[in-house]
């Protein structure tokens, strides 16, 4: 019997790239279109990671209908401008190459709409590292990280015992835990020490240069 492949599911925002300029500007654009007050930096940073519709609802006094309208305005700007207002963290291409060259197959696993993920990875020449790009759909399917990870494990026939989720927020950790896979939390993203205390990963990776060795240890 052939041994199952080593696999890593990899988050995008806050893990591979710093998307804050584009996401924050697009959120502020949406709120301005609704003639609502601008969100503060704390709320903007907290919005990086979880599904945006829920973040908009929190900014709009729990109004779920208005949150959907806000998300539409957000996508107007983000889909044409905001997704390129983004920076790849230093050392990420090298870390992904090290994982690939060590025999790890990688799948992108992001709550961001898949079509945006594909454009971002193409723009920054990162698509070459991934077997398949997985993200949410515009109708909301797979925006929940637990659902998304379960979907990827199923359709890609991945052995959970030979798989690690790499991400920067509690949603990555909770999604991995609910699907029985290990999780490496990166220290350069938008998760906080308090967040990792409440939702402990298997390992916290402090620097990009430590990513490949840490993931290979978890998979070993």
Image (cartoon, grey):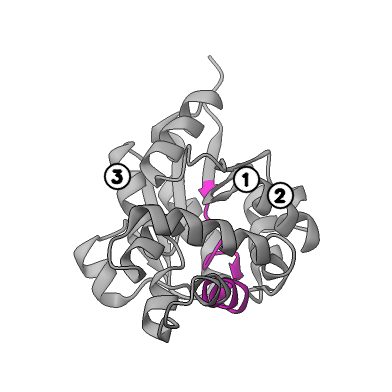
Mark drawn on residue 190: none
Position of the C terminus by quadrant:
top left
Judge whether 198 appears above or below 180 on screen.
below
Q: Which residue is mark 3?
A: 177
Task: Report the residue that reaches farthest toward the front.
Answer: 35
Secondary structure, mark 1, is helix
Q: Nearer the viewer, mark 2 or mark 3?
A: 2
Q: Residues within 10 Å of mark 2 (few under 14, many from 20)?
A: some
Residue found at x 38% / y 71%: 191
* Pointer 1 with pointer 3, Cβ within 8 A: no
Foreground of the two, 178 or 93? 178
Q: Residue 123 in the image: x percent, y percent?
A: 79, 61
Few, some or many residues within 10 Å of mark 3 (<14, 14–19, 20+): some
State the residue in front, 58 or 94.
58
Residue 118 has which mark? 2
Region rendered in magenta: 9-28
Alpha-carbon span between mark 1 and mark 2: 6 Å
Rendering coords of residue 56 (x, y %): 40, 64
- Between circles 1 and 3, the one closer to the viewer is 1
Residue 136, horizontal then vertical, whole percent? 53, 43
Is residue 14 covered in magenta? yes
Q: Which residue is mark 1?
A: 114
Residue at x 69%, y 59% (from the top left corner): 79
Q: Is residue 127 left or right of residue 173?
A: right
Q: Are marks 1 and 2 in contact (CB under 8 Å)?
A: yes
On whether residue 51 falls in the magenta region, the answer is no
Residue lying at 71% horizontally and 59% vertically, measured from the top left: 120
Instruction: Give the residue at x 43% y 77%.
Output: 36
Give SS at disc 3: helix
């Amino acid at each position: 019997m052939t041994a199952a492949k080593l696999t890593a599911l990899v988050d995008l925002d806050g893990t591979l790239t710093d998307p804050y300029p584009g996401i924050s500007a697009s959120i502020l654009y949406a709120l301005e279109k609704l003639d609502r007050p601008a969100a503060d930096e704390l709320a903007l940073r907290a919005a990086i990671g979880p599904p945006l519709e829920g973040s908009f609802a929190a900014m709009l006094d729990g109004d779920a209908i208005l949150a959907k309208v806000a998300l539409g305005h957000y996508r107007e700007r983000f889909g044409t401008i905001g997704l390129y207002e983004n920076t790849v963290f230093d050392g990420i291409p090298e870390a992904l190459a090290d994982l690939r060259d060590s025999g790890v197959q990688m799948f992108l696993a992001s709550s961001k709409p898949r079509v945006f993920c594909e454009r971002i990875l193409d723009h920054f020449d990162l698509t070459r590292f991934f077997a398949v790009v997985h993200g949410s759909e515009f109708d909301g399917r797979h925006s929940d990280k637990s659902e998304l990870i379960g979907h990827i494990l199923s359709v890609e026939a991945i052995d959970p015992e030979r798989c690690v989720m790499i991400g920067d927020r509690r949603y990555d950790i909770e999604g991995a835990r609910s699907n029985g896979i290990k999780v490496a939390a990166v220290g350069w993203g938008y998760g906080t020490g308090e967040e990792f205390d409440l939702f402990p990963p298997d390992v916290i990776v402090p620097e990009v240069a430590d990513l490949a060795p840490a993931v290979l240890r978890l998979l070993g």
